[in-house]
Image (tube, coloured by chain):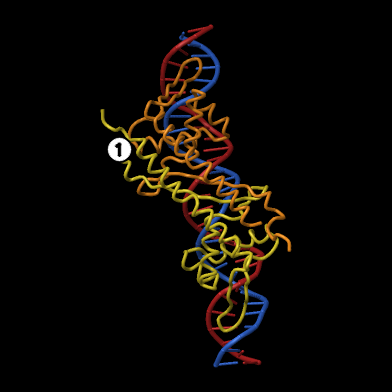
Chain colours: A yellow, B orange, C blue, D red
Amino acid sequence: MEKKFSNRLSTINLHYKIWMSDEDEQGILGDGKWQILKLIDEKGSMKAACDELGYTYRRTWGNLKKIENFFGFPLLEKHRGGSEGGRTALTPEGKKLVKAFDRFHASVDSVIQKGFDKFLQDLK
Amino acid sequence: MEKKFSNRLSTINLHYKIWMSDEDEQGILGDGKWQILKLIDEKGSMKAACDELGYTYRRTWGNLKKIENFFGFPLLEKHRGGSEGGRTALTPEGKKLVKAFDRFHASVDSVIQKGFDKFLQDLK
DNA sequence: TTTCGATATGTTTTTTCATGCATATCCAAT
DNA sequence: ATTGGATATGCATGAAAAAACATATCGAAA
């Protein structure tokens, strides 16, 4: 007979999130913080990065605080004052962390997408 | 020198979620529904499955409704009444869907875990 | 025909978080 | 020394999701 699922199959979107937590299941690092960390480093500013991603500064600041608390040392080098108001960049450890997460994602992204394609095939 | 991150590295837990949505970003099927569907079929009961997973019946019922609405045909064969109160099992389509998701997960789980292990290695 | 326990669903309360608002601090450049 | 714009942080408000509560319905078996 016909393919039961195929009617709306092409309208389905895939999503996934990867994150890490501490013993108390408090989120440490995930897709969200990874992205903002990268952008902060690129822009040299927390505020600019928040604006671009549509995050509130307040929230981002709190989230980043958590991760630094967990590791016990700063991932961001933040400076206040100056005519520019201030600036923020990643510390070497921050860069290392981001790069490791980059590699992690690179190693799984295509596999997940392929798995999804196959999933849809299976339903046909 | 020392390895900056290694102090608490072993306490980090990995998490990830995979799900699918329709055009309006309404969740259709994901890890949660997948799990509960499997368990319902295994137990022959929505209630029993909810109890085991700690989900409220109300919520699960609503969630499953959504996915059936999306596909337009039932994934569950539900019966009310009887001395046992009722029972629920997967329809053939429901089983097919669950199996496809099983395969999907099987194809990505180990890759993600390996990627995570490597991520931790990278931080050392 | 009564009963029992699961399915079915509306309504209310709680929880959770993000957002919004307010305010303080900091300092390089002018 | 003044200033402007970003960082720092408390607090109150709001919105969305989950949980909790409350009933109604169903029907095989006793």
- Nearer the observer, D15 or A84: A84
User: Which of the chains bears the disc numbered 1?
Assistant: A
Quadrant where the C terminus of chain A sits is top left
Q: Which residue is drawn at 46% across and 67% down?
A: A52
Report the number of discs. 1
Quadrant where the N terminus of chain A sits is top left
Instruction: Identify the amino acid type marked 1.
Output: Ser
- Nearer the observer, B109 or B56: B109
Q: Residue at x 59, y 68 (%)?
A: A90
- Nearer the observer, A110 or A6: A110
Q: Residue at x 50, y 50 (%)?
A: A17
Residue A68 image point, x, y percent: 65, 61
Q: Is residue B79 left or right of residue B43?
A: left
- Nearer the observer, A16 or B28: A16
Residue A28 image point, x, y percent: 61, 55
Q: Quadrant of residue A71?
A: bottom right
Q: Is residue A11 left or right of residue B78?
A: left
- Vertical comparison of C29 with B69: above or below: below
Q: Residues within 10 Å of mark 1 (few under 14, many from 20)?
A: some
- Vertical comparison of B30 with D30: above or below: below
Quick one: which residue is furthest to the front in this view? B1
- Vertical comparison of A48 with A120: above or below: below
Question: Which element type, helix, strand or loop, lies under badge 1?
Answer: helix
Residue A24 image point, x, y percent: 67, 48
Quick one: which residue is furthest to the right in this view? B1
Q: Residue at x 36, y 35 (%)?
A: A122
- Vertical comparison of A98 with B29: above or below: below
Residue named by callout 1:
A6
